[in-house]
Image: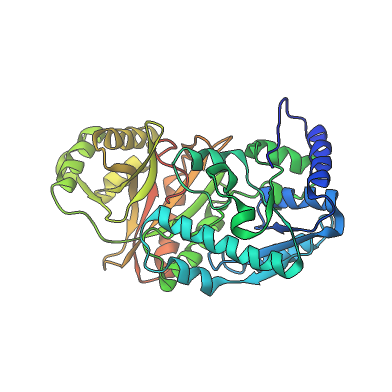
Amino acid sequence: MAAQVTGFRPSSFLQAQTSRLRELSDGKKALAAISGGVDSTISALLARQALGERVIPVLIDTGFMREDEPEKVRDKLAKPPLELKIRIVRSAGRFLKAVADEPLAEEKRKKFRETFYQVLKEEADKFGCEYLVQGTIAPDWIETQGGIKTQHNVLEQVGINPHARYGFKLLEPLSELYKDQVRSLAKHLAVPNEFSQRQPFPGPGLLVRCIGEVKKPKLDILKRVTSIVEDRLGAVGSNQYFAAIIENKFANEPLPKALRKVAAEALDLPEGDVRAEAFMDRVTGVKGDERSYGRLASIDLRPETREAFGWLHDKLNVLQSSIVESFKDITRVAMLVKDRRSEGQYSILIRAVSTRDYMTASVTPISWKTLKDTAEEVLKSSERIGRVYYDITPKPPATIEFE
């Protein structure tokens, strides 16, 4: 079911969708998939308004959420004024097994999607639910149909029949809306800011921020680092800010030499002042309205030069655009903030973007001191982290998430 929205007005939309949900569900029970984000929360509230006690909200603990997040979401949503009673479905081991040893971003997303809906199918069967309510919004299916990346909550829009495959029909009341419109609905419904203004978190969670193969130790490090980065950057005025983790494996020459030359020219520096590498694991981007699955370039400058350029955000923008335009296989550029003397197994990538609709996004100009302080705390959190970078790539040519 797709919501048809022209001349968006929250009150009219809510009235129309409540009636539509009630009509389409035809007195049957519905499972509502909740993550704690504004999209799934509003969808569940709409469904409850239309179907009452026939809605059963569930949260699947995939193992890829933040530390203790399933319990926090359950407890907060249970309180007034929302009073959504949620069941947590523990499935972390099942999801980790499904994506084990898979390095490719699209394959990881597809395996996550299949596991996600199989778990929901089992829950729907258990409670006799013929419908699934989910918080799919327009950017989800636009990116999926465009081949940019597979969003886990997009089925019918890409030709998958959920009733034939999983045994339930979909109710997607927000599928024609964008994030700002959903937030407008949340405000109209008096949803607390901790849900309505919460920064987006991908459906597959930290899976798509664990670049390349997912291993539990790697995932555990990312969970700790995510807490640090979100705490440190919460006040910088960014719409979305987070961390990703990648293994310190790099491409061989001649790519680093060519990268170094372009970077030095972009910054008007001697080549000897620049170190450039390209990670082996690939990341997702957009070039010419098409998906680009390429390498992440890492740029390092001498410490004193790094400090100076860290405050010159216009220069860093010139740097990333010069590199992405010069190399077909480069999707993103990250600037080293801080490293340790002993080489660790992983690098952490900090990303912060400013956006209105999440279809395009600019890099948030965070002060270099804030980045350095954050990087120092990240390095202290695990000896297996060797470097901390700041992603300086807007959308496009990058996507907001790394995978």
Farthest-out residue, top: 7
User: In x, y percent, where is residue 328?
Assistant: 26, 38
Camera-side residue: 62 or 16? 16
The answer to whether residue 11 is above or below residue 79 is above
Q: Residue at x 68, y 58 (%)?
A: 34
User: In x, y percent, where is residue 60?
Assistant: 63, 65
Whether residue 238 is visible, yes or no, is no
Q: Quadrant of residue 147?
A: top left
Quarter of the image that includes the N terminus: top right
Q: Which residue is drawn at 72% across and 68% down?
A: 87
The answer to whether residue 321 is above or below residue 190 is above
Whether residue 228 is visible, yes or no, is yes
Camera-side residue: 239 or 75? 75
User: In x, y percent, where is residue 141?
Assistant: 55, 41
Camera-side residue: 297 or 132? 132
Q: Which residue is drawn at 79% across and 58% down?
A: 29
Q: Which residue is drawn at 56% across and 39% down?
A: 139
Q: In which quarter of the image is residue 238?
A: top right
Question: How many discs appear?
Answer: 0
User: In x, y percent, where is residue 395?
Assistant: 44, 37
240 vs 284, left or right, is right
